[in-house]
Image: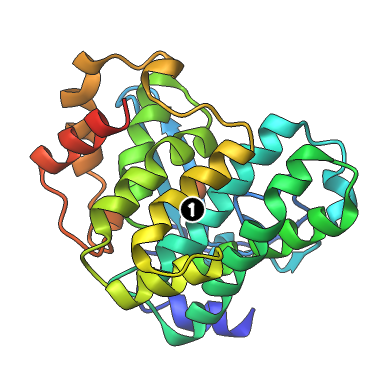
Amino acid sequence: MWFARTVFRRIVFNVLAGRRTALACAPTTAGTGSEVSPNALLFDEAAIAKKAVISPALVPDVAIVDPALMLSLPPALTATTGIDALAHCLEAYANLAAHPVIDLYALEGVRLIGAHLARAVADGSDLAARSAVALGSLYGGLCLGPVNTAGVHALAYPLGGEFHLPHGLSIALMLPHVVRFNLPALPERHAALAAALGGASAAELPDRLEQLIGACGIRMGLSAHGIPRDAFPRMADAALLITRLLKNNPRPISRADALQLYASSL
Ligand SMILES: [Fe+2]
């Protein structure tokens, strides 16, 4: 925890005065990484948007990560929360603000989740698979404070904000498409991410992600989840407001790019 408190202090916006009560967190999903991150996401009903409160005061004093607490998590939630955790690691690694210490957690998190998530979805009682995914999720949480996510999360937030899709599902729907868009930037980092998922080159990364998402039983396509094409302009406008994440993305994302990415995800 020492390094997290010291490393992220220089880059996050501290909006809380502090905390007087000890905080211990025991996650019951392997997804958010909240047990070690300084991020809290709230839904602003007036703005119809998710907004972040980010502060070192939100980092728990104790994290109790026990995969036995996740054994009863249903397959669909195991799948979507696990893809969210994978995206935390992936986006922290392919990131303009990447950090060499965090790279270690990010790549290993991708490897752990990539190798075990489908198993945990298929057999929720597989404690070894649950343990690996839980560790990957913890690593993803450690990525969030010092580096944070990027374009995938920025473009996914409007799916939750306006259409109330679960966060992990929103991430899964956008992940392969935004990664495919980002591939020309940071080619060596994308190649390393592909290798962590068993691929031979950066070009294989989006396909590997689609295979994993499919193997976890997640149905792709915005239209399959009730999101119409005529919402894309509103979604693009909302996504472009999330500059705290877009500034991390390997490639700049214009409004036209955002519209194209939603269209390719339809
Ligand atoms: Fe997330």
Pick the quarter of the image with the C terminus: top left
Residue 214: percent from the left, percent from the top? Answer: 56, 37
In the rendered view, how is the structure colored? rainbow
Percent across and percent down for residue 133 are: 71, 57
Q: Position of residue 86 (x, y in %)?
A: 55, 56
In which quadrant of the rendered view does residue 64 lie? Answer: bottom right
In this image, 95 relative to 207: left or right?
left
Which amino acid, by three-letter code, is at mark 1?
A: Arg
Whether residue 69 can be seen here: yes
Q: Quadrant of the N terminus?
A: bottom right
> In the image, is residue 154 above or below residue 197?
above
Q: Residue at x 29, y 27 (%)?
A: 47
- Above or below residue 196? Residue 150 is above
The one of 225 and 245 positioned closer to us in this rendering: 225
Quarter location, residue 108: bottom right
**Residue 194 to residue 79: above or below:** below
Asked where in the image residue 202 lies, by quadrant, the reply is bottom left
Would you name the residue on which mark 1 appears?
208
Q: Residue at x 34, y 61 (%)?
A: 203
Which one is in front, 211 or 10? 211
* Residue found at the far front of this picture: 200
Mark 1 lies on a secondary structure that is helix
The x and y percentages for residue 243 are 23, 52
Q: Residue at x 90, y 51 (%)?
A: 68
211 vs 266, nearest the viewer: 211
Query: Is 26 placed above or below 80 here?
Result: below
